[in-house]
Image (cartoon, rainbow, N blue to C red):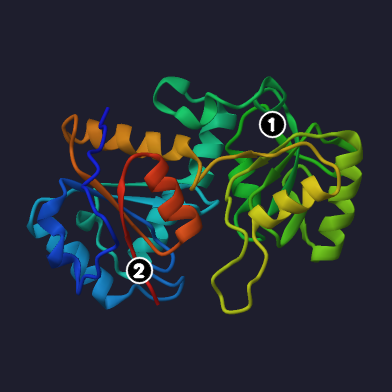
Amino acid sequence: GVSANIMDAAAPVWIDGIGDIADQYDAYLVDLWGVVHNGSVAFPWAVRALEELRRRGKPVVFLSNSSRRRETNLAALAKLGVRRELFADLITSGDEAWRALHGVSCQDRPAAVGLPRAVLAAERILVFGNGADDAQYMAGLPGRCSVPLAEAEMLLARGCAALSKAEGEFAPATWHEQETVLSAAAERGLPMLVANPDSVRPDGADSPMPGRLARRYVELGGPEPHFIGKPHGAVFQTALLRLSELGVPEGARVCMIGDSAWHDVRGARAAGLDVTLLCS
């Protein structure tokens, strides 16, 4: 796989654009929400930066904490006008969680390696959903189904908008309703898998995200959750493996571009990567 070289820097350096650093690195990992788009539109300056990296032959892999699957995000990017030729691949925490539960080989999916049997073997899952594609997400997992709390063997946190009521059935849920379920699950000591470690949505209202569910679960006495996604190391390992498969050589200089000090900077630095932090 690729092991990145860290460029020495005594202090952060301000840059005016991607052109200032493009040739200092061999490949880039790039966050999506807040960096490439805001959920509604792709940022023109981000598209121009991707075009410049492509012109210079720098492979880009998007690395996102989206709880949705890779294909869902690819379709969303196409709709936003982010052309497929501008990036080499896309890795999401939601897709890595799905692959771990599906049983995809752990050899090239580090996220599954650290998960306990209680998670990997659970068949009946209480899902905290995003309210959009929850039924579709679960339908692709053979041998597993979404259930209410009373039947659950584990919790899957991929959103804060809905709760599973039966196989393939989800209902909107308030934060108070989710806290009530969390409290009862904590009493039973059910394991939790978090498919998006973000705590708040960057929507101007600080809407809660699965990371906040995880924190609240521990406060209520539940066991420590298991996280897939930034800043946790496994998803960075997966991204570096993917770059290696794309032909990026051992010892390449890899830079993470993101907008979160907690998820992008913290995670990338722990993985041995330089970081470009967008400040807005």
Alpha carbon distance from label 1 to label 2: 39 Å
Give the position of the N terminus as an image quadrant: top left
Q: Which of marks 1 and 2 is in front?
A: 2
Circle 2 SS class? loop
Considering depth in this image, is 18 or 127 the residue closer to the camera?
Answer: 18
Would residue 91 appear left or right of 100 to someone viewing this image?
Answer: left
Would residue 15 appear left or right of 153 to someone viewing this image?
Answer: left
Q: Position of residue 20 (x, y in %)?
A: 13, 66
Q: Say which amino acid is labelled 1.
A: Arg
Residue matched to label 1: 144
Q: Where is residue 227 in the image (x, y as percent from the top left)?
A: 60, 41
**Nearest to N terminus: mark 1 or mark 2:** 1
For label 1, the crowd category at 10 Å Cα-Cα, with few meaning under 14, some 14 to 19 and many 20 or more, is some
Q: Say which amino acid is labelled 2.
A: Leu
Residue occupying the point 22% across, 39% down:
5
Residue matched to label 2: 278
Give the position of the C terminus as an image quadrant: bottom left
Residue occupying the point 60% across, 34% down:
141
Q: In which quarter of the image is residue 257?
A: bottom left
Circle 1 SS class? loop
Residue 267 visible from this viewpoint = yes
Residue occupying the point 31% across, 36% down:
240
